[in-house]
Image: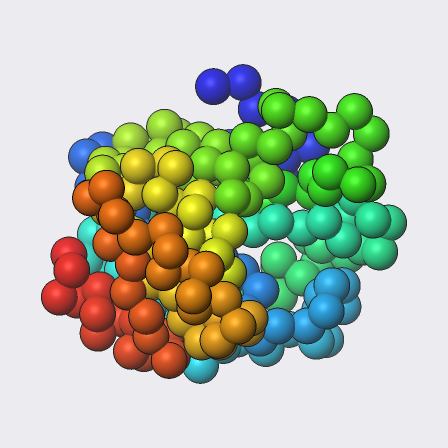
Amino acid sequence: MTIPPDIWLSTATPPRRQGAPGLFLDRDGVLVKEVNYLKNKEDVALERGAAEIIAWGRAKGLGLVCVTNQSGIARGLISWAEFEAVEAEIARRLREKEAALDLTLACPFHPDFTEGYGAAQDRWRKPGPAMIEHAGALMGLDLGASWLVGDKAADIEAAKRAGLKGAVIVATGYGAEEYEAAMAQEGGGFTVLTAATLDEARALLEAAF
């Protein structure tokens, strides 16, 4: 898969977890508390249960991937330097709780703010599946056995389009407003579960994996 140069990866060489399932997580409203266009590292606050679900995934041998739309970059509201400082702070906060992601992918595209936006860019911006697909290829993950946790219907649709087994829509972030649209994605062998918190999502995933 050809990756556009503007797609950000935390590392070009994430660990290979050949044949293992992946746990994909959205960032804003899931890993960290929702802040409208998070640009300052001082505003980073982990969502309750975020470190714990990642540590649980590590113990299970899952590939741990964050996939995040960052249209604030296309809108000119956030610079790449600010974004990277936020990412470094998230990683630091997770390390403090003995948790770590394998890989983060960020898509800066937005149809109204990215010049020349078309089908190629649309596949990378959730609900497009390309960030999930690319992470799966890089790490050798079994996408058909993988799950995603998100707070928007677009997250859940991206998981379905990428061929994941299922997804959990959490009420953190925008989740409570997106339940109905997210649940509409269920079907065709794709499961959608609902959880009030990340701790509840973890309990559901313990039964699912």
* Front residue of 81 and 108: 108
Vertical position of residue 161 compared to residue 76: above or below: above
Q: Quadrant of the C terminus?
A: bottom left
Q: Which residue is located at x 30 percent, y 37 percent? A: 163
Asked if residue 50 can be seen in this view, the reply is: no
130 left or right, relative to 90: left
- Expressed as whole percent of the image width and height from the top left, the position of residue 77 reads 84, 56
* Front residue of 19 and 201: 201
* Front residue of 117 and 57: 117
- Expressed as whole percent of the image width and height from the top left, the position of residue 36 reads 72, 69
Vertical position of residue 100 compared to residue 48: above or below: above
* Front residue of 1 and 127: 127
As drawn, the residue found furthest toward the top would be 2
Q: Which residue is located at x 51 percent, y 51 percent? A: 154
- Expressed as whole percent of the image width and height from the top left, the position of residue 187 reads 25, 48
Q: Which residue is located at x 57 percent, y 24 percent? A: 3
Q: Give the mark count.
A: 0
Asked if residue 75 can be seen in this view, the reply is: yes
- Expressed as whole percent of the image width and height from the top left, the position of residue 62 reads 25, 51
Identify the image quadrant of residue 17.
Answer: top left
As drawn, the residue found furthest toward the right would be 76
